[in-house]
């Protein structure tokens, strides 16, 4: 089975581009190839105008990466972690010192410059990782689940920094996330990837419009029978049955929900629950993949292996 199968897309300079997909869909594999951590078996790709196969060093100098799992050295201070990263990228000493101070101020960690990372909270560590990834002024920033496991307030705080950087530096950002609200609110465009293929790609708004109308979620004593009846109605657009519930896309849900209830009554089907809402990216994801997205973490072993490859290749 191919991890990534004929994926093709273009990301414009200054764009925030999101990858949505279940675990194993090919998100991390795609990003790993673009970041030169994995070598593709076929095809071509360019990052910041550089060929990922023929110009690996130029690609690596052009990008910053924030991994899902922590990659900081807990026994070093915030400054020392930053300084070590700058040395790896051969940032001159004078510039390195100035940039470290600026970036720690940017992420509001300047008062913890000389504190050991092991004393930091999860949100502080993630902010430090973002600052570290920006030290060499990358043109493209890869973020792999950057806020997974953080509380909502910290998530919002981190995204404020990232959004500000995108706007002020015209930095291109490519991210993976399981949080649909993040993708909807932040991304200029979103690609939904499943089984190694991109099944949909567009702006969040257009993707929501693509599934049509409103969404009715209901659970009855006989979902299949009611779904068959509903599918014959003029207002029916599409539907999925997931985990004991039917997700129905219709036109004018407020008007037609009464007809669904009427159909159930005529056929003695008991309605257990029913709800109506406008389409969300979660509904789009369900529509195109037939499954709900799950916030699961990739294995630490795989992350460390990718980091080893990146450092070994410098």
Image (cartoon, rainbow, N blue to C red):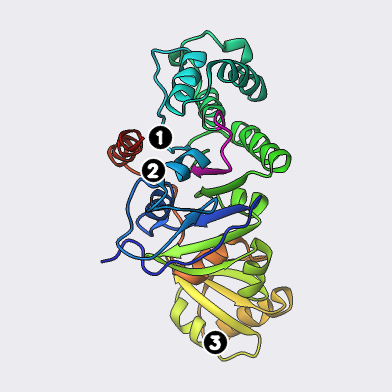
Q: Is residue 57 left or right of residue 114?
A: left
Tell me if residue 272 can be seen: no
Disc 3 versus disc 1: distance between alpha carbons?
45 Å
Look at the picture and state if 31 lies above or below 99. Answer: below
- Asked if 229 appears above or below 150 in the picture, the reply is below
Q: Secondary structure at mark 2?
A: loop
Region of the chain picked out in magenta, as a range:
134-144
Foreground residue among 151 and 216: 151
According to the picture, the residue beneath numbered tag 2 turns out to be: 297
Q: Is residue 54 left or right of residue 273?
A: left
Q: Which quarter of the picture shows residue 104?
A: top right
Closer to the camera: disc 3 or disc 2?
A: 2
Magenta stretch: includes residue 138 = yes
**Residue assigned mark 1:** 69
Q: Earlier in the sequence, mark 3 or mark 2?
A: 3
Dot 2 crowding, Cα within 10 Å, few <14, some 14–19, many 20+: few
**Does label 3 or label 1 sit earlier along the sequence?**
1
Closest to the camera, between mark 1 and mark 2, is 1
Residue at disc 3, secondary structure: loop
Residue 182: x, y in percent?
61, 48
Considering depth in this image, is 113 or 229 the residue closer to the camera? 113
Q: Residues within 10 Å of mark 1 (few under 14, many from 20)?
A: some
The residue at 50%/28% (across/down) is: 129
Quadrant of residue 11 in the image? bottom right
28 inside magenta stretch? no
**Gap between marks 1 and 2 measured at Cα:** 8 Å
Residue at the limit of the structure toward the top, as seen here: 114
Compared to 93, does 33 lie above or below?
Answer: below
Task: Please state if 216 lies on the left or on the right of 267 as rendered.
Answer: right
User: Where the C terminus falls, by quadrant?
Assistant: top left
């Amino acid at each position: 089975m191919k991890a990534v199968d004929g994926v093709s897309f273009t990301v414009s300079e200054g764009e925030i581009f999101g990858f949505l997909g279940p675990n194993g869909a090919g998100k991390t594999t795609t990003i790993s190839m673009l970041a030169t951590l994995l070598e593709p078996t076929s095809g071509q790709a360019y990052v910041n105008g550089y060929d990922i196969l023929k110009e690996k060093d130029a690609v690596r100098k052009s990008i910053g990466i924030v991994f899902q799992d922590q990659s900081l050295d807990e026994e070093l201070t915030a400054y020392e972690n930053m300084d070590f990263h700058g040395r790896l990228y051969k940032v001159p000493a004078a510039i390195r010192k100035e940039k470290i101070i600026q970036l720690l101020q940017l992420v509001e960690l300047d008062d913890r410059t000389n504190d050991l990372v092991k004393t930091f909270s999860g949100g502080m560590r993630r902010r430090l990782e973002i600052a570290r990834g920006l030290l060499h002024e990358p043109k493209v920033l890869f973020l792999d689940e950057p806020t997974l496991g953080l509380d909502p307030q910290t998530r919002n705080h981190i995204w404020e920094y990232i959004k500000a950087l995108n706007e002020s530096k015209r930095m291109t950002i490519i991210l993976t996330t399981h949080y649909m609200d993040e993708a909807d609110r932040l991304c200029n465009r979103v690609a939904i990837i499943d089984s190694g293929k991109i099944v949909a790609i567009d702006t969040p708004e257009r993707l929501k419009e693509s599934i049509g109308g409103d969404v009715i979620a209901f659970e009855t004593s006989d979902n299949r029978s009611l779904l068959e009846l509903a599918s014959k109605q003029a207002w029916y657009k599409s539907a999925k049955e997931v985990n004991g519930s039917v997700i129905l896309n219709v036109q004018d849900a407020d008007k037609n929900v009464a007809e669904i209830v009427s159909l159930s009554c005529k056929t003695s089907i008991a309605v257990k629950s029913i709800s109506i809402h406008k389409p969300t990216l979660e509904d789009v994801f369900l529509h195109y993949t037939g499954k709900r997205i799950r916030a699961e973490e990739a294995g630490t072993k795989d992350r460390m292996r990718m980091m080893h490859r990146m450092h070994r290749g410098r």
